[in-house]
Image (tube, helix red, strand yellow):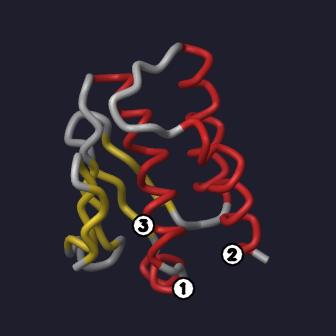
Amino acid sequence: MKKLMLMFACTIITGLVQAESKYTASDNAVYVQAINDLKATGLIISMNEDSHTIVVNPSVWAALDYELKERAVSIVGAHFDYQSGYSSVTVLDRYTNKKLAAFGIFGLKVY
């Protein structure tokens, strides 16, 4: 059920996330809602806008395929881009603080 909710949250905003776009406040409101949906699924535990990091539940993260991981992190990247002008995101494991992935101009790299 949570995976289905996550897929839905990622799918509804996929068309909004585009490289090198300038986002409006209404676009960002959609991203914030999508991030709240990702938090509700249990994927995102916390995020730090200053350091561009998100802390995720490793069990939920591991259950996702690459495409869903990329969509979820790109949503956060779009929000960070609106806030600070760059969209990089570092994904950290909730329990070990280990770097699970990084997202930037070249896409998502999963470790």
Q: Secondary structure beneath disc 2? A: helix
How far apart marks 2 and 1 lie (CA) works out to 8 Å
Mark closer to the chain start, 1 or 3: 3
Determine the residue located farthest toward the top in the rendered image.
Answer: 25
Q: Which of marks 3 and 2 is nearer the N terminus?
A: 2
Q: Residues within 10 Å of mark 2 (few under 14, many from 20)?
A: some
Q: Quadrant of residue 40?
A: bottom right
Choose top left, top right, bottom left or bottom right for residue 80: top left
Are circles 3 and 2 on residues that touch, CB within 8 Å?
Answer: no
Answer whether labels 2 and 1 touch (C-beta < 8 Å): yes
Q: Which mark is residue 3?
A: 2
Query: Looking at the picture, how far across and down is residue 21, in whole percent?
Result: 40, 25
> In terms of depth relative to the viewer, which is nearer, 68 or 56?
68
Indicate the amino acid at tag 3: Val
- Residue 98 pos. (x, y %): 20, 75
Residue position for label 3:
56
Query: What is the x, y in percent for residue 30?
Result: 64, 31
Secondary structure category for the residue under label 1: helix
Q: Earlier in the sequence, mark 2 or mark 1?
A: 2
Q: Which residue is labeled 1 in the image?
A: 63
Q: Looking at the image, which residue is at 43% across and 62% down? A: 70
- How many numbered discs, if any? 3
Q: Distance between the residues labelled 1 and 3?
A: 12 Å
Label 1 amino acid? Answer: Ala
In the rendered image of this protein, does residue 31 appear above or below residue 6?
Answer: above
